[in-house]
Amino acid sequence: MILEHKGIPIFYSDEGEGSVTVLLHGFLENTTMWTELIPEFSKSSRIVAIDLLGHGETGCIGYVHTMEMMAKAVKAVLDYLDIEEVTLIGHSMGGYVALAFADLFTNAVKVLCLMNSTALADTQEKQLNRDRAI
């Protein structure tokens, strides 16, 4: 499904019923990384997977997307779906987005899971590698 936000499309999927879990992919990935997990997870929960800004079928707002910008785009999807409280699972960069979301929208986060991610800032080497990938 597509939601327009700040003049760009944001792609998301929404499957299942019950408490909501939001899946946030890593850098240079998209929602397809969750394809095999969503059918299992959606048996017991409502699963929302979102292509983050500049990834998958979601457009770019600018040349650089901060974690806070991505967190606000996630919130726009949740507001559109009338979802108030979520479990966030963030893989790699998606973990950074989940942390930014939790910082900005603390009351909306029930559970936070960082998968292959960290709450610590990137090292200079990791920043260089990411810049090379960009």
Image (cartoon, rainbow, N blue to C red):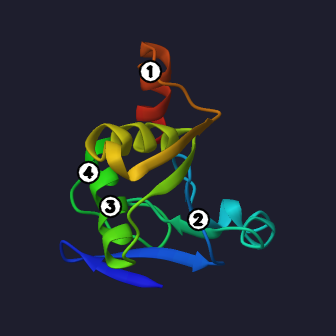
> Image quarter for residue 52?
bottom left
Q: Earlier in the sequence, mark 1 or mark 4?
A: 4
User: For the residues marked 4 and 2, what is the alpha-carbon distance in whole angstroms?
Assistant: 25 Å
Query: Relative to the observer, which residue lies in front, 62 or 80?
Result: 80
Q: Amino acid at mark 2?
A: Ser
Q: Is residue 30 visible?
A: yes
Residue extending furthest toward the bottom: 1
Q: Point out residue 104 in the picture as x, y percentages from the top left corner.
A: 26, 43
Q: Do callouts 4 and 2 mark residues in contact (Cβ within 8 Å)?
A: no
Q: Amino acid at mark 3?
A: Lys
Give the residue at x 42% y 14%.
Answer: 124
Nearer to us: label 3 or label 4: 3
The residue that disc 3 covers is 75
Residue at image mark 4: 69
**Dividing the picture into quarters, in which one does residue 42 lie?**
bottom right
Question: In the rendered image, which residue does mark 2 sit on?
Answer: 19
Question: In terms of sequence position, does the residue under pointer 2 or pointer 1 come before the other?
Answer: 2
Mark on residue 122?
A: 1
Contact (Cβ within 8 Å) of mark 3 with mark 4: no
Label 2, label 1: how far apart the Cα atoms are: 32 Å
Q: Amino acid at mark 4?
A: Met
What whole-number distance in Å separates the C-alpha atoms at marks 3 and 1?
24 Å
Residue drawn at (50%, 27%), measured in percent from left and top? 129
